[in-house]
Amino acid sequence: MSREIKFRAWDKEDQVMDWPTEISWDDGGDIQNVDAYHKKMTNNFVLEQFTGLKDKNGKDIYEGDIVQYGNEEDMKFNVTFKQEIFYACNTLGSEFMVDTFLGSLAIGNRLKIIGNAHQNPELMETDK
């Protein structure tokens, strides 16, 4: 079973999230241009990939999202993509818990998107 490949783009200048209609790469594999709603964005955006997973409310989970597991306040994770795998990185840091495979947290339908790293950076802060 294959997952749907789609992206969203955080526009750093306008501070808004856009959903690209077209992405082009140069011969070296680097992103050359992103067209979101016919607005050309170059070097002024953060491109984030859909994980293939949905939260308990049916919302698509993208890298850069901040998700919460169940009702536990300390169980907030930043979704990242590294080593070709989507991870849930605990916002309290590695001394609290190591990075976890995002898919393993999605089992049981207890994940909920509570924001994203661009619009809600305060969700990644801790008082501890």
Image (cartoon, rainbow, N blue to C red):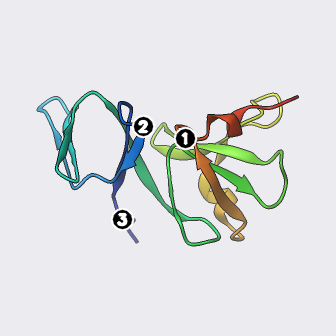
The local secondary structure at tag 1 comes to: loop
Residue 81, given in percent of the width and then of the height, sits at: 49, 41
Vertical placement of residue 77 versus 44, above or below: below
Asked which secondary structure carries label 3, the reply is loop
Q: CA distance from mark 3 to mark 1?
A: 25 Å
Closest to the observer: 112 or 3? 112
Question: First in sequence: mark 1 or mark 2?
Answer: 2
Residue 101, given in percent of the width and then of the height, sits at: 63, 49
Q: Is residue 112 left or right of residue 51?
A: right
Alpha carbon of mark 1 to alpha carbon of mark 2: how far?
8 Å
Mark 2 secondary-structure assignment: loop
- The residue identified by callout 3 is 4
Which is more N-terminal, label 2 or label 3? Answer: 3
Q: Quadrant of the C terminus?
A: top right
Q: Which residue is mark 2?
A: 15
Q: Earlier in the sequence, mark 3 or mark 1?
A: 3
**Nearest-to-viewer mark from 3 and 1:** 1
Q: Which residue lies at the image location 78% right of the left edge and 33% below the top edge?
A: 92
86 vs 114, left or right, is left
Q: CA distance from mark 3 to mark 2?
A: 26 Å
Amino acid at pointer 2: Gln
Q: Amino acid at mark 1?
A: Gln
Residue 77 in the image: above or below residue 6: above
Q: Which residue is mark 1?
A: 119
Check if mark 1's residue and mark 2's residue have beta carbons within 8 Å.
yes
